[in-house]
Image (cartoon, rainbow, N blue to C red):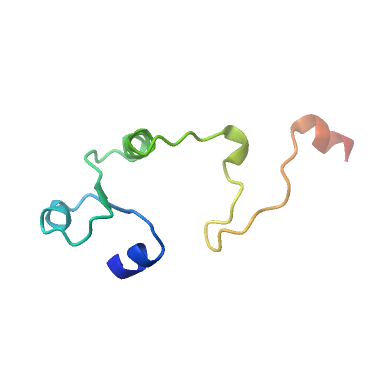
Amino acid sequence: MVDVAQAEERVILTCDRTFIRMGYSDQAFYVRTTNKQEQVREVLAHFNITVKEDSLLSRCAKCNGTFFPRYDSLAARQL
């Protein structure tokens, strides 16, 4: 996992204090909270990430490919 993260220049998100304390990777972020919604807020705030509503659910979770174009309700009715 650490080798892949380093090769792909990714950050490892973990709640494992031992992982952080042992210094297995300098590309790790310790997520302090246990509540899933708070975890998302914590990570977004730490990395200064802004999520726009139109980008939500715009990529496939399995392959990271793009989904079909999203249309607002008015545009969808006109199709």
The quadrant the C terminus occupies is top right
x then y, percent, for residue 46 = 32, 36
Can you name the residue that lies furthest to the top here? Answer: 74
Horizontal relation, residue 17 to residue 64: left or right: left
What residue lies at 24% left-to-right and 38% top-to-bottom? 33
Write down the quadrant of residue 6 in the picture: bottom left
Horizontal relation, residue 70 to residue 46: left or right: right
Horizontal relation, residue 24 to residue 79: left or right: left
The quadrant the N terminus occupies is bottom left
What residue lies at 11% left-to-right and 59% top-to-bottom? 22
x then y, percent, for residue 74 = 81, 30
x then y, percent, for residue 62 = 53, 62
Horizontal relation, residue 25 to residue 66: left or right: left
Q: Is residue 15 above or below residue 54?
A: below
x then y, percent, for residue 57 = 58, 45
What residue lies at 75% left-to-right and 38% top-to-bottom? 71
Q: Is residue 22 above or below residue 35?
A: below
Q: How many marks?
A: 0
